[in-house]
Image: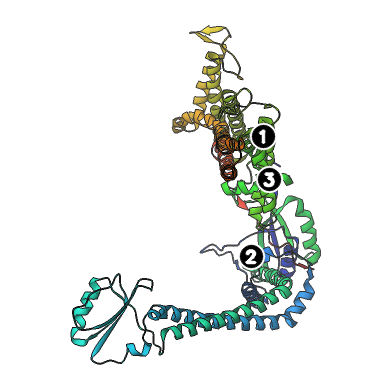
Amino acid sequence: MLRPERMRRLLIVAPKSETDTIVRELYRHNVYHIEDFVPESGSSDGLSIGHPLSGASDAASGLIKIRAIENACGIDPENVEVRTRIPASKVRAMIQTDLPAIIEEVEGLVASRSRLEAQQKEHEQRAKELEPFVAVPMDLDLYRGYTRFSVFTGHIAHDVTIDAPHEKYFSDKVDGNMIVVVVPNEHREEVERTLLDAGFQAIPVPDETGAPADRLKAHQEEARRIEGEIAAINGKIAGIRERHADFLVACDELLTADVERAEAPLRFATTEETFLTEGWIPERNFEKVKEALVRATGDRIYIQELEIEDDARVPVEYENPTFASPTQMLIDIYARPRYSEIDPTLMVAIVFPIFFGMILGDVGYGAILLAMSLGLRKIVKGEGGRMLLKVLSYASVSSIIFGILYSEIFGSALPWPALIFSRHLNIGGAAGGHGPQVVELMIIAIWIGLLHITLGRILGIVNARKIYSGKHATQAVLSHAGWLGTMWGIMLMIWAFYAIPLMPDLTGLPVVAMGLNVAAVVGVVLLVAGILGIAQENPLELVELPTIISHVLSYARLVAVGLSSVAIAMVVNYIAIGMIIEPQLEAITPVGVIIIIVGILVLLMGHALNTALGLLGGGLHSIRLHYVEFFTKFYKGGGKKYNPFGMKPKFTEE
């Protein structure tokens, strides 16, 4: 539970004639993680990379065609719901009989659509080029064919005065204005300079004849006609998607399996007569798979269990209770655990929602986030998104529970007083009972920080004994113990001199020496011993001593961020209800009704914004306390993801 799943390292050797049988058996069980064979340069051990099985090229070619058809039809296997699983034998038969006709039909429709889309773009482009000329009452063929005159057409910032002999037409009805100027050739340069000084931008005359308005209309009508044909083709493609989606995704799944099996020998080492592969298999599956391989090959196989020499090479598979599985997403964002170290998933699955609830402890906001997470889980198809939404649903339930304990709902008090400590602020005269108990809440946060960090250091000691050996392990254990001694030594010294609420009062203990009582002396001893323990591993670590205090105080964010959310909620209530709505209820008027509606909108928008801020603040700060303050005490990460050779069929069945 607190460790990744136990793995065994295997060496499998068999004759080449058994390659297909063994590959199929390993693929069927879907538990064997292959270690790719990489030949060493200059090696003379006679091993080389294997060759694909027969049929690999045909399967890969078929898979490419299937995925092209899926892409054309807008089919995503991840988003296709399983209505019925098709037998693999039936799928293979349909690949030979039905698939060629489907491919031919879809390819024909896609080719027709591409041709029509190109034609549509051409007509739309021509229509765009014609638009400026519609404002000029002149046929397009009159702009060309002159030997003694030059014609200027284009956009210009404003009308311009031309001194040379000319004919001009200016229109401000066109975006960017439109100007047409006809001048004798001998005045061309003079007029061109005048136009450029006025910001003239030339545009070419479309290579067409007739009135621009008529040509524009013709192109627009043709573009609309083509759009209708494209829509009809899209309708036919949608019909194919509706009729054949189940078959196409089943083909994709089946051919993907064929390709993966056929290309598996590329990951093996081979000699002239045999092949061999190294890999990993979960301990609980070892005997079952071994028996299956021996039975399938008629005992023509050699299987040896190898020692695990380097835990960094071991693929890591999580082994957690069902409720903790979604939290694995948060661990992977940081780093997957190494094989030998403690997996913190279960601890994060428990503590993260508690931190989130402490920050956003409000029944109303928690209910909104819970409803949102449950609703989005029906829409979001990706596994990662669904896992994060499950984590959010757990955190939302925690927020509701803490809201009940804090007696909070949208910044207002519930019918009962706070069951633990109150966070209600004195805003608008609504302090809620005895007002906020900030000091007590801060001290609770400090206690949480002390215990959380202590747990991290203890786990660090356990990990050090698992990961390291010899002198290195001893140094790491003493270093973690030193950090613990230093932190608790500082706390004992503080308690020896100051009486702090909700913390041990050690000020009354008898004085031993130099004005220091028993607690202070023990604190000094722990502090000195802790510093020595830290320094024995690496003296440079002593510069990090101030982080002991900063990391503990960092847990104050559990209170500070939560109080900011309460303050925003109460301010929203005071502005919307106390300042806008309530004064209008004394004497309702038509204008007052409008103001009340405005107040309701302010109330809804304010709480919607605060819900978003609460989600962001509660989530980020809760996970930050794990990543920075907790994980840095014991967690290295960097494990390799367990990627078994095989597939769990979704659309097909053997």
Label located before the other in sequence (1 or 3): 3
Q: Which residue is mark 1?
A: 403
Q: Amino acid at mark 3?
A: Leu
Task: Give the foreground label among 2 and 3.
Answer: 3
Residues under labels 2 and 3: Cα distance?
A: 49 Å
Q: Which residue is mark 3?
A: 370
Query: Residue 436: x and y, percent?
Result: 59, 26
Query: Residue 322: x and y, percent?
Result: 73, 46
Looking at the rendered structure, the secondary structure element under dot 2 is: loop
Looking at the rendered structure, the secondary structure element under dot 3 is: helix
Residues under labels 1 and 3: Cα distance?
A: 13 Å
Label located before the other in sequence (1 or 2): 2
Q: Is residue 257 above or below residue 598?
A: below
Residue 310 visible in image: no
Label located before the other in sequence (2 or 3): 2
* 564 on left or right of 4: left
Q: Quadrant of the N terminus?
A: top right
Query: Residue 496: x and y, percent?
Result: 55, 14
Query: Residue 547: x and y, percent?
Result: 49, 31
Residue 552 visible in image: yes
Q: Amino acid at mark 1?
A: Gly
Q: Which residue is mark 2?
A: 268
